[in-house]
Amino acid sequence: MRYKIDGKIYDTETSTRHWASRQDFDGSNMIDRATGSQWAQQTLYRSPKGTYYLEHWSQYQDSTATAEVLPPAEAAAWLLEMDYCLPADLQQFADEILG
């Protein structure tokens, strides 16, 4: 999927890495940890130039996927919230986020 954000093109097909939001079972359904919904999800991508962008998408009929660029500290916080290890370029934010 290609997105134009602030005049730049971001393509999920050329990303160097991606992380899907985690899902937790609530006893009936799998609920996306990032959105709190069983229908809406997020995926974080790193572009070839090292920019992190967050894709928002939904299983609702006729919904349109969107994306936004995240500052590195927000990308690091998102990854930690999803229980991922931070990549080397975001390690500097670990102490700040974890306290």
Image (cartoon, grey):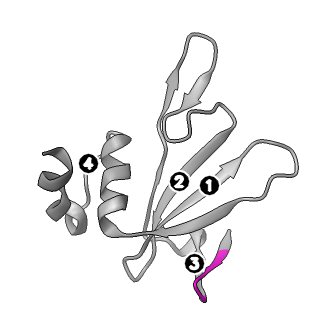
Side (left or right) of 13 relative to 85: right
Q: How far apart are marks 1 and 2 (CA)?
A: 7 Å
- Residue at left 26%, top 48%? 85
SS at badge 1:
strand
Q: Is the magenta region chiefly helix, strand or loop?
A: strand
Q: How crowded is mark 1: few (under 14 residues within 10 Å), some or many (20 or more)?
A: some
Question: Is there a contact, CB below 8 Å, between mark 4 and mark 1?
Answer: no
Residue 19 position, x and y percent, is: 45, 52
Query: Over which residues does the magenta segment extend?
Result: 3-7
Residue at the top extreme of this rendering: 27
**The residue under label 3 is which amino acid type?**
Tyr
Earlier-in-chain disc, 1 versus 2: 2
Spatial separation of the CA atoms under disc 4 and disc 3: 23 Å
**Residue denoted by label 4:** 85
Mark 3 vs 2: CB contact within 8 A: no
Which is closer to the viewer, label 3 or label 1? 1
Q: If you read the primary sequence from the N terminus, does the residue marked by circle 3 or circle 2 appear first?
A: 3
Measured in 3D between alpha carbons, the distance from the residue under mark 3 to the one under mark 1, in whole angstroms, is 14 Å
Nearest the eye: 59 or 70: 70
